[in-house]
Amino acid sequence: MSLSRRLLQILNFAALVAMLIAVYAALVLAPDAINVDPSIRPAQRIIYFHVPSAWSSMLAFFVAFIASILYLITKHIRWDIWARAASELGIAFTVAAIISGSLWAKPAWNTYWTWDPRLTTYTIVLLLYIAYFMLRGAIDEPGRRARMAAVYGIFAFLSVPLTFMSIRWWNTIHPVIVDAPENTNKFGLGPNMMNAFMITNIAFIILFVTLLANRISLGWAEERMDALKERLNF
């Protein structure tokens, strides 16, 4: 058994344990929020999955952004694999955040969706990174595909900080969970709620790192397979 395979197994086990702890923290450890309507207090527990999903998506896109820069500097295929893997995970976490946010929005706002500044900019982020893979699929030559994807990935990332700051710059019904300015819709977290909130965020970071490591490993396998096919003239 190779060291890399052993490390992946350790990461997989750590992610499983972390997510089980996160579920316990969100559903059992955390108390109900006292600053929301009692009828929707059970639904507020969705924030322990919604916010970590959103933050993990932004972390993934940041990793893709850095990897894209490193590819343009070094031209090494490893950074293209990193950028592709992180972008895929970013899309997955974005979809998870949108779905969980909609489940919270229905009892809180009486609608699954509204074109709020945060939701609008976050949708733009999702569409930009879907287009990233459409661009990759439209270019056959590997070197040119990686180069064009890296350039696009750098510019696509500009939408991520815009989304993060949208609820601080514009009037919005979307609450700010942490570090809320006075002019924003706050969602205060008590001490026990903050403990559960931090546990779930750490768990999602571990999950992201684990998924990224597995996807990068798969990416290298795909590269070796493509190289073998090319040598065999498939």
Image (cartoon, grey):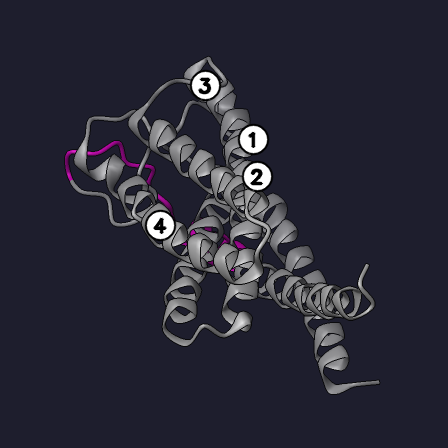
Q: Are marks 2 and 1 in contact (CB under 8 Å)?
A: yes
Q: Which residue is mark 4?
A: 157
Residue at the (49%, 31%) spot, across then down: 101
Q: Position of residue 144 (x, y in %)?
A: 48, 58
Earlier-in-chain disc, 4 versus 1:
1
Residue at the (72%, 69%) spot, across then down: 227
Looking at the picture, which amino acid does disc 2 mark?
Answer: Ala
> Which of the numbered marks, if any, corresponds to residue 113?
3
Q: Quadrant of the C terminus?
A: bottom right
Question: Mark 2: which secondary structure?
Answer: helix
Dot 3, how many residues are within 10 Å of its Cα: few (below 14), some (14-19), or many (20+)?
some
Q: Quadrant of the N terminus?
A: bottom right
Dot 1, how many residues are within 10 Å of its Cα: few (below 14), some (14-19), or many (20+)?
some
Q: CA distance from mark 3 to mark 2?
A: 14 Å
Q: Which residues are magenta?
A: 182-200
Looking at the picture, which amino acid does disc 3 mark?
Answer: Trp
Q: Which residue is mark 2?
A: 96
Earlier-in-chain disc, 3 versus 1:
1
Dot 4, how many residues are within 10 Å of its Cα: few (below 14), some (14-19), or many (20+)?
many
Q: Nearer the viewer, residue 197 or 72?
A: 72
* Number of the front mark, 2 or 4: 4
